[in-house]
Image: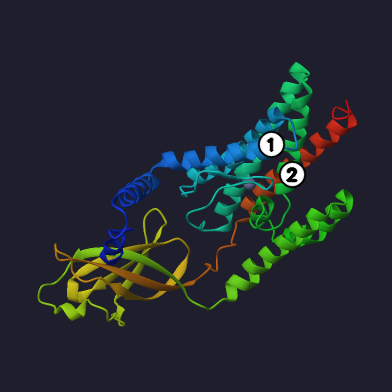
Amino acid sequence: MSLDMGSPEREAKSTNRKKGSWAWTAGLILLLSKAKSLIGLLKLQTLLTALISVAFYATVYPWTFAIGLVALLFLHEMGHVWAAKRRGLPVSAPLFIPFFGALIMMKRNPKDAETEAAIALGGPMLGSLAALVCFGLWEWTGYEAWVALAYIGFLINLFNLLPMHPLDGGRIAAAVSRWLWVVGVVAFPIIIWYTGSFIYVIIWIWLMWHMYKRFFGERNRKDYNWTEGVYQTAADPLLPSWYYTGQVRRGSLPISAYCRMDGQHVATFYWEQLNYRGEMEINQPCIVHNATVVQVSEPDEANQITFTVRLYYELYEPSNYYEVSALTRIKYGVMYGGLAAALFAMMAYIHQIGALER
Ligand SMILES: [Zn+2]
């Protein structure tokens, strides 16, 4: 079991502080460490960042519109969350970034391009549907804010469908044809020219850099990544105390790596002298190289030692990652193209009837 706890050394230092503040800090740390595992906090994170975003948007738009905009972003993200859940991939709750949008984080990389595309498509699907509902509400009530929301909703989702990494469109394109990425890179300057907005130049450069990093940088990168875990076990009374103190054990521990039933990459290590078998989760497809103990504490009163194990691994992208059947390519191509065309048509329609100028 992996534990997130401070070493006894650190605890001893903190007792030197005033007792009141120590108790308060300890209480807060305990609360945070407990709450971290609760979904409640993740939802609170979503709620808090959503409120901050509303406040920011409200400086530019009427606050009712700001709420609507954040709700549209939320539904887009929930589309991703829903799609990821269906594929059994753990994701974080949505997080809002004022004037940037919102995002979710995948806690594990998808196993192939088709899975990545399915999760990417979920967002614009639900997001566009939400914008369409806004449009319907405008037709029904005649209240102008609804059509403005519908328009910006269509625009946001269409923008996200641009075939560039890491936008949703770039991820969907991977399961259709990777040539679409080239289309994205070439087509983007047209948007810059059309909008005449300098911010898009920055976004374009950022997207290009991202794509370069993913397709040339990361793939050829040979340097090792590492991850650490903190573990606790009973000290062996037969081992001399110097075994634990100061001197860090430099040797490698025997390891084995496997893929769990749910698709999680797991590495196990074995510390023979302590007869301790530990486990560590790795969130990226990788080749595990070795594990070493980088820090060991002295045995405490209960004869327990706390130690840190560092695992070195090399990222690896399965060579069949982009292998997608022809039928699947057509399926995603139709959904991707159809959705983009529908969004474009809705925006053109709103322009044509002059709903925004009224
Ligand atoms: Zn998205």
Q: Quadrant of residue 204?
A: bottom right
Residue at (72% x, 42% y) in the render: 156
Dot 1 amino acid type: Ser
State the separation of the CA atoms marked 1 and 2: 9 Å
Q: Which mark is residue 263?
A: none
Dot 2 amino acid type: Leu
Residue at (88% x, 54% y) in the render: 193
Near mark 2 (Cα within 10 A), the count class, few <14, some 14-19 or many ≥20, is: many
The residue that disc 1 covers is: 128
- Where does the image place residue 43, in percent across and percent down from the top left? 48, 39
- Where does the image place residue 324, in percent across and percent down from the top left? 60, 58
How is the model colour-coded? rainbow
Residue at (72% x, 55% y) in the render: 163
Near mark 1 (Cα within 10 A), the count class, few <14, some 14-19 or many ≥20, is: many
- Where does the image place residue 280, in percent across and percent down from the top left? 35, 63
249 sits to left or right of 236: right
Decide which of 327, 71 is in the foreground and name it: 71
